[in-house]
Amino acid sequence: MARLDPSGLLRAAPLRVSLVTALALAVVSNLLWDRSLALYFKVRDHAPLVDFFRDITDLGKPGMWFVGLAFGGLVARALTLVPPSATWTDRLRRVQDAGVFLFLSVALSGVFVNLLKLLTGRHRPRDLFADGTEGFNFLAFDPYLNSFPSGHSQAIFALAVGLVLVLPRFDHLWIATAVLIALSRVATSVHYLSDVIIGAWIGIVAPILLKRYVFDRRGIGVTFGPEGPLVRLFAPPKTKQQEPDT
């Protein structure tokens, strides 16, 4: 019997493997960790670590990134109108394409997350602290019940993974920043850990799929610099060319 190679499985079906893993972690977290972590950080509401997370948590708001990306794209577009050389024009167009790619990564994954929020209808930790209410109200379509998944985690991971694909040289910096901001949602008692896990997963896969099935297929380049280790991890497997018979 052929030996199972976990690394080969990850390369062959990264989306399915990561989805199953994220769902399993979310279920376990919901059963074992969500409530206890929420209460733990609530008791330590004014601890220095919680204050630090409170200072950085707003960096996950998608609105500020939308404005920044839109402004950067407009500047790049304006500069292409008065180019000093063809090489400069091509570079600016790639910068503009990268800005569009990052914008769509955050925006499209955000639409999906907001739809899931309405469908799942999960109470936020604030309701647990107020009167002990927690859990899901599926298909309630109540905007107040909007804990699952975490929109901040989705937005910052979509941006971070998008930046990994655009500027892979700094991939560890982008991911470390995203992890800190996503964890801040739990530390500030705004979301449960399972909310963050699924929000982060959506943010991770959105730019990968967008680049692979839209930008790459249209021949639109958005990457600057050599590939980093994280890009190679999610790259599709290379098929071996069959050697000719001798």
Image (tube, helix red, strand yellow):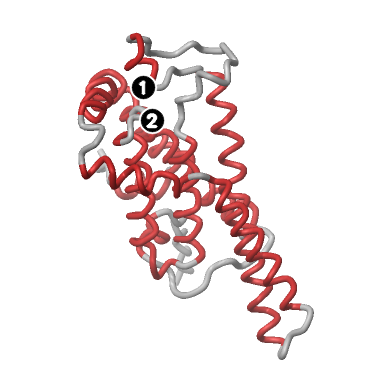
Residue 129 appears left or right of 145: left
Residue 109 appears left or right of 12: right
Total labels: the figure holds 2
Viewer-proximal residue, 195 or 124? 124
Q: Please name the residue shown 45% across and 57% down the image.
A: 235
Q: Which residue is mark 2?
A: 190
Q: Please name the residue shown 44% across and 45% down the image.
A: 58
From the top left corner, tell me how far across and down residue 8 is, in percent: 34, 49
Viewer-proximal residue, 175 or 231? 175
Dot 2 falls on a residue whose secondary structure is: loop
As drawn, which residue projects farthest toward the bottom?
84
Labels 2 & 1 near each other (Cβ < 8 A): yes
Question: Where on the picture, by quarter, is residue 182?
Answer: top left
Q: Which residue is mark 1?
A: 125
Dot 1 falls on a residue whose secondary structure is: helix
Residue 82 appears left or right of 214: right
From the top left corner, tell me how far across and down residue 196 is, in percent: 38, 35
Dot 2 or dot 1: first in sequence order is 1
Q: CA distance from mark 2 to mark 1?
A: 6 Å
Question: Where on the picture, by quarter, is residue 147?
Answer: top left
Q: Please name the residue shown 57% across and 12% down the image.
A: 139
Say if 244 sits above or below 182 in the image.
below
Amino acid under disc 2: Val
From the top left corner, tell me how far across and down residue 234 is, in percent: 42, 53
From the top left corner, tell me how far across and down residue 222 is, in percent: 58, 66
Q: Quadrant of the C terminus?
A: bottom left
